[in-house]
Image (cartoon, rainbow, N blue to C red):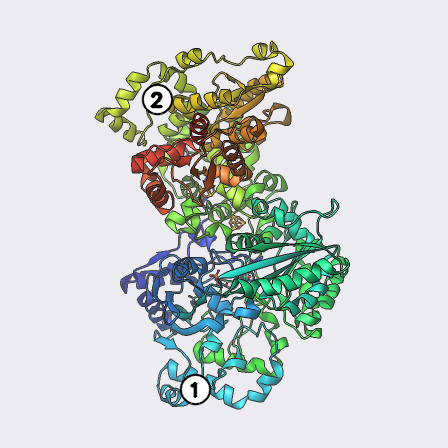
Amino acid sequence: MLPRVSDMRAPAPLHSELTAELRLRGFEGDLTHAYGDRIVSATDNSIYQLLPQLVAFPRSVEDLVRVTRVAAAPRFKEIVFAPRGGGTGTNGQSLTEGVVVDVSRHMNRIIEINPIERWVRVQAGVVKDQLNAALAEHGLFFPPELSTSNRATIGGMISTDASGQGSCLYGKTRDHVIELTTVLLDGTVWTSRPLDDRELKQIQQRPDLVGAVHRQVDAIQREQTELIAAHFPKLNRCLTGYDLAHIRDDRGRFNLNSVLCGSEGTLALIAEAKLNVVPIPKYSALVNVRYGSFDAALRDAQELIRFGAASIETVDSRVLGLAQDDVVWDSVRQYFPEDDGQRATGVNLVEFVGDTELDVETPVRKLTATLASAEPSRGRRGFTVARGETEVDAIWNMRKKSVGLLGNMQGDKRPIPFVEDTAVPPENLANYIAELRALLDARGLVYGMFGHVDAGVLHVRPAIDMKDPAQERLIREITEEVVRLTSNYGGLLWGEHGKGVRSEFSPRFFGPLYPTLQSIKAAFDPQNRLNPGKIAAPAGGRLLTIDELTTRGQLDRTIPVSVRAAYDEALHCNCNGACFSWDPDEAMCPSYKATRDRRHSPKGRASLIREWLRQLAVLGVDPVSEAAALRRNPGWRSFIARLRNTWAAEPDFSHAVKEAMDGCLACKSCSGQCPIKVDVPTFRTKFLEIYHSRYLRPLRDHLVGSLESMLPALHKVGWLYNSLIDSPPGRALMRAVGLVHSPRFSGISMRQELAARRIAVATPQTLAGLSVGERARSVVLVQDAFTSFYESHIVLAVLDLIRAIGFHPFIAPFRANGKPLHVHGFLGAFERTASRNAAMLRELAGTGVELVGVDPSMTLTYRSEYGMLDEADRPPPVLMIQEWLALHRDAIRKPSTAGEEYLLLPHCSERSLALSTLRDWQTAFAAAGASLRVLSSGCCGMAGTYGHETEHRATSEHIYGMSWGPQVIKWAQGGRLLATGYSCRSQVKIMDKQTLAHPAQALLECLSRG
Ligand SMILES: Cc1cc2nc3c(=O)[nH]c(=O)nc-3n(C[C@H](O)[C@H](O)[C@H](O)COP(=O)(O)OP(=O)(O)OC[C@H]3O[C@@H](n4cnc5c(N)ncnc54)[C@H](O)[C@@H]3O)c2cc1C
Ligand code: SF4
Ligand code: SF4
C-alpha cells in the first residue's frame, strides 16, 4: 500500500510571518506556501530547481507596493524576492529560494490601446500573443519576436530585453518601451521615460530612492562615456543587463529604462508598460532555400542578406528532423520537399515584408531568379516560396517550436540550455559555428542548431544526461570554452535569453565596468534582495555560479531507473512552458487556461509527479511493483485500511498531486502538442491507480468505470432509465453521486434499424464466408458505447454513408472499449477489457476486412491507451471513419449540384493525436463536391466524463465559453457547423441547445442531393 508522503517542507517561519503581515496589510492577490505551488514555481526552462518559500500572485500595483513596504521592515531584511512572468527563462532568471512574485496570474490586463498614436499600455503579466491578438483588429502589432510568444509576458520580455526573428528590422523589446511603471524597493511607484536635462535635474533633487538612482545612473553616463564605448560590443543584439551604452538616447535624453530593460528583476518590480506598436505589414513572403549542409546554409546566408530581407533564419537537419516527427510538420511539409530522395540538411528562411505587393514581390523575384538561374552552387539544392500571412505564419510557427522540439530527442541525453543563445557579429558566424561544432563533436555530443543568422545569434542545445554526474560536469567545461570562443569572435555568451545564473561571467566580460554595474545595483537595491546573484551584486556581494545550484538532474537521479522508465512521459518535461499557451483557440491545456493555475497545466502535473516519485524513492517505495501487487490482490482486502486512511485525513503530498490530476480533462492535448510529448493522461492514470491503494474511491468512479459494461443491460430498459434521469429525484440521485447532465438513451432500436437495412453483425465466420472481392468491398464498423447508445442515429448515418459509396457495412458486436476505466485509473480492469476487445478485433481484422470507428476519442484509444498492452495483445488498425473515406475517395460520387461549405469543430484528441485526419475529412468533402473548413478551436470542456462531474461543471462551462461558445454562436445557424466528438456535441446541446451534426451526416446529405 502506498505510504503517506509527509515531507512537504514547511516554509521558514520568517516567510510565514511575512505572509501573515501581507494579509494584514490588505494584500488582495493570492499568497501560497502550499508545497505543490512551490514545486511548480521551482523550475523554469533551465537545468535548475530552487524551491521558493512563498509564492505571491499580486492583483495590482498596490499589491506590489504592499510587498515592498512590508518587506522593508527590518525584521524581514533576510527575505529575497524574484519577480516572475511566464517562467520561460532558460537560465534560472526567475528562480529563487525566497519569495516568487508572479504577476502572470492576475496582472494581465491590456489597459489602453491608442491606435492613432500607436501605443498601448499593459500590465506586466500580459502575454505577448494576447497583446498582438488585441492589436490585430487595429492593424497593429508589438514586433519584438520570441519563440515563447504564446506564454512569455511583457514584464518578462522587458526584463530580458527579449528579441528573436526579425530583430534586425524591428529591434529588441527595449526599442519599443516608451514608459515603465515600476515599484521600487522602498515602495515608490515610479514611471520612467526619456527625460530632458531640466526634468532630470528636478528628479535628481528628490530625497528618495528615485532621486538616488537618477543621480547614480546619470553620473555613470557622464563620467564613464569612453570606458563604456570601449567595452560595449557593437552588435545588433546590444548587451542586456544594465545597458550602459544607451543611458542617453539618440536625441540625447536621459532614459532610466535603458538599465531597467534587461535587468532581470534585479532592480525593481515592473507593474505596467507603455509600448510602441507598429502597423502589420500587409504583404509577406518567405523564400525557403534548401542546402546539402548546415555550414553551406550558414555561409550562404551572408550572400542572401544582400537581397534586403526582413529576416533570415537558418535551421539544421536535426531540428528539421524533429519537426518532421511533430504535428507541426503537417502544415509546412509542402515547403520542404526532398531532393532526389534526400532531406535538406540545412535551410535558410528568408522573409520579405512590405506594405504593397510590389515591395515584397520585387526582391522575392530578384532572389528567386538568382536562385533559379545559378548553377547549383554554395550547397543550394532548391527553394520554395510561401506567400501570405497564413502560410508564412505556419513556417514561422514550425521554427518557433524548434527550440522546444530540440528537447524532444529520445533517450536519457536530452538537449539542454546553457550556451544556447550566443551572439557574434554575423560575418563571423559561420567560422564561429565551425569551431563550436568541433568543440561539441570532440566530446561526442549530439546537438541541433538554428539561428538568426542576420543577427549572428545561434541557438544550440547539446544533449546531456544531467542525471549522470560525469556529464553534468560538461556544463562548466563547455561554458568556459564557449565564453572564450565568443569573446575571440567579438561576441557574447548571452545573445538573447538573458544572463540568469550565467551572470557569473559578467565580471569577466565587463572587466573595469563591472563595478559600475555593481553601483547601479546598489543604488536600486543596496541590501541585494531583488533576484540576488544575477546581473550584478552590490560591492561585497557575490554572483551565483553555474554549478552551485541544485539541478533537476540531481533530484531526478535519486529516482530508480526502472521507475523513471515507467514514468517516462512525465520525467522528460523540460519546463519550456509551451503548455501555458494563452490562445483559447488552440487545443493545448484547457484546465490551465480556465484556472490560470500552473499546477493545473501539464508542466504543473509533471513537476508534481516528479517530486512525488522522488519522495517515494526516499521512502524506499517502488510504485511500479506497488501497482503490480495491487493488480494481483482484490481491492476488498484492503478496504478497511483504506477507509481508515480516508477518514484520518492526514496531510499527504499525494493529496496535492491528486488535486492537480483531478483537474485534468484527460483531453490528450498535451500528449500531441507538447514538444516533448509529455503525456499527462498516461501518468495520471498510473498515479490514480496507486493513490487508491491507500484511499477509497468515490462511488462515482466505479459507476463511470463500469458504465460501458452496464450500458447494454440498461439500454434494454432505456425508457425507464430515461424517465428516471429526467425526473427530479433521478437528477438528485445523480447529483448525490457527483454527476450532472447525464445523457439519455437515443430511443432507437439498433436491432430493428439494422434489420431494416439488412446490416449484419460481423463475426469472423460471416466475414470469412465472403468472397475475396466481397471482402474488399466490405467494412466493419466498430461500435463505441457513447455513439451507439446515446446517438444511435449517427451510427446509422455512418452505415448509410458506407453503403452510399458502394461498400457493404457490417457492425461489430458491442464490446466495452475500456477508455473510462483508463481515465479513472482502473488499470487492471482496463487491461483485461482492452485485451478482450482487441482479441475480438484481431479476429475480425484477420479476415482482411477493414475496421472503422466513429468517435475520434474512442477510436484513437486503440492507438494510444491500448499501447500499454503486450505487443501480441494489441488491436489491429481501426481506422477513423475519415481515414477510411479518404482512402476510398474515388468511390465517392460527386453529386450533380454544387456542394456548400461546411465548418468543423474537431475533437481535441483528433487535433492532437491525428491532425492529418482533419485533412482526410476535407478530402472526403471535396470528393462529395463540398468543402470543409476546419475552425481553430480549443476544448469544448466536456472531455468524456469531466463535464458531467459536479465539481468540474463550472470549469467545464468556462472552458466552453472560451472558444466553442463564441464559435457556436457565430456559425451554428444554418446547420453547416459540424462536430466529430460525441462529448462535444452533447456539450453544445447542454450549453447552447444546438444539435450539431456529425460530418458523416453532412456527407450523406451532400450525396443525397443527386
Ligand atoms: C523554448 C524557448 C524559446 C525561447 N526563445 C526565445 C527567443 O526567441 N527570444 C528571446 O528573447 N527569449 C527566448 N526565450 C527565453 C524567454 O522566453 C524570454 O527570456 C522571455 O522574455 C521570458 O519571459 P517570461 O514572461 O517567461 O519571464 P520569466 O521567465 O518569468 O522571467 C524572466 C526574467 O524577467 C524577470 N521578470 C519577469 N516579470 C517581471 C516583472 N513584472 N518585474 C520585474 N522583473 C520581471 C524575472 O525576474 C526574470 O529575471 C526562450 C525560452 C524558451 C523556453
Ligand atoms: S509539459 Fe511539455 S509543454 Fe509543458 S513545460 Fe513540460 S515540456 Fe514544456
Ligand atoms: S490532458 Fe488536457 S487537461 Fe490534462 S494536462 Fe493534458 S492538456 Fe491539460
- Judged left or right of residue 122, residue 877 is right
Is 201 above or below relative to 13?
below
Q: Nearer the viewer, residue 322 or 415?
A: 322
What residue is at 43 percent from the left and 11 percent from the top? 755
Q: Is mark 1 within 8 Å of ligand 1?
A: no
- Say left or right for 495 vs 738: right
Please, is residue 877 above or below residue 202 in the view? above
Q: Which quadrant: the C terminus?
A: top left
Residue 600 position within the rendered picture, expressed as x and y whole percent measured from the top left: 42, 47
Residue placed most toward the observer, 19 or 221: 221
Q: Which residue is mark 1?
A: 215
Residue 497 appears in the picture as rendered: no
Please say whether residue 781 is visible from this viewpoint. yes
The residue carrying mark 2 has its beta carbon less than 8 Å from ligand 3: no
Amino acid type, label 1:
Arg
Q: Please state if 224 lies on the left or on the right of 661 as rendered.
A: right
Q: On residue 404, which mark appears?
A: none
Measured as percent of width and height from the top left, residue 579 is found at: 48, 49
Q: Residues within 10 Å of mark 2 (few under 14, many from 20)?
A: some
Q: Quadrant location of residue 379?
A: bottom right
Amino acid type of the residue tagged 2 in the rendering: Ser
Residue 746 image label? 2
Residue in the foreground of this view, choosing between 509 and 298: 298
**How far is mark 1 from mark 2, CA to CA?**
77 Å
Residue found at x 38% / y 40%: 941
Pick the front one: 221 or 657: 221
